[in-house]
Image: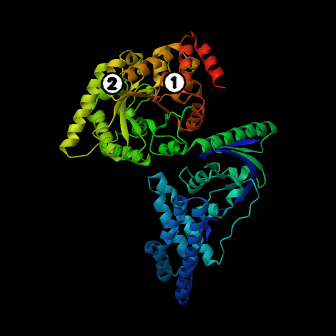
């Protein structure tokens, strides 16, 4: 049994038998020249081949639109555009006329020029477009040789393995019979990845060229598209293990199917907002696919990472705007920068600290760097608020003054936009995260300054129980069942409601089904979690009414230990 690791391109697990699809490499075509007397004839053959290729592509586009989707069919729309581009096909003709190249050679030469151009682009997506050029060029050459477009016949439960799969190869396969795709090269933005995600077929890309030797036609394999692992000739124990995983995954999919388009409701029909946390524009799709009703936390720090300077106002605006638009009017809570703690950003030159989690972090840093960090971000968020349903919140609040000062900078940011007649949502809601015990203690005062609260349990647990959330040695202690933590959560919810503001939760506890009765009973208004947890939470919500859940709160708060609380939550969640 061998295990090979690649890039997870499309989630899901499957087992099946290997079938190799061969990728024809055009680069290997021999350079041929023709006699000058044959030039006109050669140009004519090329034109005919291009026309034939166009006819085929129109059919494939239609088929893909019916079988997969409009967006995926556009891949072939792009191929058709190449064939209509005089720069592309015109240069091929010139190469025949001026350099007496055979049509095949002319196609290859032009293709190579474009491939180099795409390979040199910095954008991953554009880089991956080189496959389109190769694919469409290969189609022309096939037509020149008189080869028809044939579909590969495959058996049921086939795992297709290839060096790379072009869009045309993927389109010609019978999707009903394919259990999974694995390619040696390619990235998450390659067509195989995009198509398999749309089809819901597990896929691994970039598994390395050694798979082409490590696996033989007909071998039994397991493809774990979620972890990116390919298991060759699994033993009995592994097969049984994966049969269980496959069954669990199917159950999850069924749950997703059932709850995706259903509003989250309690047993007695009260609608509850269930949302997903995001870290970038691409994550929005995951929230929508899982049936999320918005995002209760957009962690903007990821925008600042993996680069060497602060993203400027315009760059941030574009990202926030895209998120707002992609979310289709569902609410998105953008959290202002939360770095420091365990998240370092080298170009900010943060000094090393003895206790970074208790130090120069999040709102503290932003209030110290108003002009170069905080205000540009606030302005970008305000501008984006004009394009969707945006709310904003400050993280790691531990004092009243911080909120007053942050809101003052917000007013300055608004005034600067007003001066330039730049529009924004004047009613944009502004909230704070409840992540420190101090914030809970003064919640009644804070509630008068903001529109909402969102409890960040990851930090609230750490600061309440003095348990470093990143220390693996004490990870057991970082749990939401501690009676002290539960008491603070209830207190924060009560104080929000007494002051007529709403309160959500975006820490991991919001997606923990065991805590659901407690949070519901305590009166939480919004739950925001990792998108994959949404369907299960919606299901669990149907088991409770707020009234019934209130008893859970009273009972849990009489308990003395985390273990006792957890046991109780487990009992009632069966
Ligand atoms: C939290 O602390 O619970 C939270 C949601 O914020 P983060 O995990 O990003 O610190
Ligand atoms: Mg936090």
Residue 428 coordinates in the image, percent (x, y): 32, 37
Please tell me whether mark 1 sits on a helix, a strand or a loop: helix
Category of crowding for the residue at label 2, using alpha-carbon neighbours closer than 10 angstroms: few (below 14), some (14–19), many (at least 20): some
Residue 395 coordinates in the image, percent (x, y): 38, 27
> Which disc is residue 527 wearing?
none
Identify the residue at horizontal 59%, vertical 71% (top origin): 59
Q: Which residue was labeled with disc 2?
A: 364
Category of crowding for the residue at label 1, using alpha-carbon neighbours closer than 10 angstroms: few (below 14), some (14–19), many (at least 20): many
Vertical side of 226 occupied by 194: above or below: below
Residue 358 coordinates in the image, percent (x, y): 40, 18
Closer to the camera, 70 or 107? 70
Identify the residue at horizontal 40%, vertical 48% (top origin): 325
Q: Which residue was labeled with disc 1?
A: 519
Closer to the camera, 233 or 378? 378
Left or right placement of residue 15 versus residue 485 in this view: right
The quadrant of the rendering that contains the C terminus is top right
Give the total of numbered labels. 2
Specify the quarter for ligand 2.
top left
Left or right placement of residue 124 versus residue 474 in this view: left
Mark 1 vs mark 2, CA separation in Å: 29 Å
Identify the residue at horizontal 66%, vertical 20% (top origin): 571
Indicate yes or no: mark 1 CB to ligand 1 under 8 Å: no
Answer yes or no: is residue 34 visible: yes
* Farthest-out residue, right: 236
Answer yes or no: is residue 352 visible: no
The quadrant of the rendering that contains the N terminus is top right
Left or right placement of residue 230 versus residue 352 in this view: right
């Amino acid at each position: 049994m061998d295990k090979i690791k690649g890039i997870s391109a499309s989630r899901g697990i499957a087992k099946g038998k290997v079938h190799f699809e061969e990728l024809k490499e055009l680069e290997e075509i021999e350079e041929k020249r023709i006699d000058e007397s044959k030039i006109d004839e050669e140009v004519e053959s090329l034109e005919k081949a291009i026309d034939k290729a166009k006819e085929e592509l129109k059919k494939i586009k239609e088929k893909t639109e019916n079988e997969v989707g409009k967006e995926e069919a556009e891949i072939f729309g792009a191929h058709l555009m190449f064939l209509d581009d005089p720069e592309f096909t015109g240069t091929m003709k010139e190469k025949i006329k001026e350099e007496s190249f055979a049509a095949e050679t002319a196609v290859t030469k032009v293709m190579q020029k474009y491939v180099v151009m795409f390979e040199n682009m910095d954008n991953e997506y554009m880089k991956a477009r080189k496959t389109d050029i190769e694919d469409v060029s290969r189609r022309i050459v096939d037509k020149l040789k008189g080869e028809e477009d044939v579909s590969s016949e495959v058996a049921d439960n086939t795992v297709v393995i290839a060096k790379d799969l072009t869009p045309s190869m993927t389109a010609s396969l019978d999707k009903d019979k394919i259990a999974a795709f694995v390619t040696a090269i390619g990235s998450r933005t390659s067509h195989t990845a995009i198509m398999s995600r749309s089809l819901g077929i597990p896929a691994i890309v970039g598994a390395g060229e050694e798979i082409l030797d490590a696996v033989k036609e007909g071998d039994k394999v397991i493809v774990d598209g979620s972890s990116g692992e390919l298991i060759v000739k699994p033993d009995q124990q592994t097969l049984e293990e994966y049969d269980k995983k496959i069954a669990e995954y199917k159950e999850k999919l069924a749950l997703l199917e059932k709850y995706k388009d259903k509003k989250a409701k309690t047993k007695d029909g009260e609608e509850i907002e269930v949302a997903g946390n995001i870290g970038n524009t691409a994550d929005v799709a995951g929230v929508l696919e899982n049936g999320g009703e918005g995002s209760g936390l957009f962690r903007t720090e990821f925008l600042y990472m993996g680069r060497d300077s602060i993203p400027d106002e315009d760059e941030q605006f574009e990202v926030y705007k895209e998120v707002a638009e992609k979310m289709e009017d569902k609410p998105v809570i953008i959290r202002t920068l939360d770095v420091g703690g365990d998240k370092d950003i080298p170009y900010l030159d943060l000094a090393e600290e003895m206790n970074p989690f208790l130090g120069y972090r999040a709102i503290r840093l932003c209030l110290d760097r108003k002009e170069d960090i905080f205000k540009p971000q606030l302005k970008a968020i305000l501008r984006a608020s004009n394009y969707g349903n945006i709310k904003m919140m400050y993280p790691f609040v531990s004092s009243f003054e911080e909120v007053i000062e942050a809101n003052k900078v917000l007013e300055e940011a608004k005034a600067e936009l007003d001066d330039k007649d730049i529009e924004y949502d004047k009613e944009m809601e502004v909230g704070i995260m409840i992540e420190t015990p101090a914030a809970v203690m003064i919640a009644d005062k804070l509630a008068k300054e903001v529109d909402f609260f969102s409890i960040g349990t990851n930090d609230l647990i750490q600061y309440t129980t003095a348990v470093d959330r990143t220390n693996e040695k004490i990870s057991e202690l970082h749990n939401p069942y501690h009676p002290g933590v539960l008491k603070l959560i209830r207190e924060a919810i009560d104080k929000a409601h007494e002051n007529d503001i709403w309160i959500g939760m975006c820490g991991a506890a919001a997606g923990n089904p065991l805590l659901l009765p407690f949070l519901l009973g305590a009166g939480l208004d919004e739950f925001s979690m990792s998108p994959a947890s949404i369907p299960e939470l919606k299901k669990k919500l149907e088991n409770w009414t707020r009234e019934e859940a209130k008893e859970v709160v009273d009972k849990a708060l009489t308990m003395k230990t985390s273990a006792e609380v957890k046991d109780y939550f487990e009992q009632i969640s069966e």
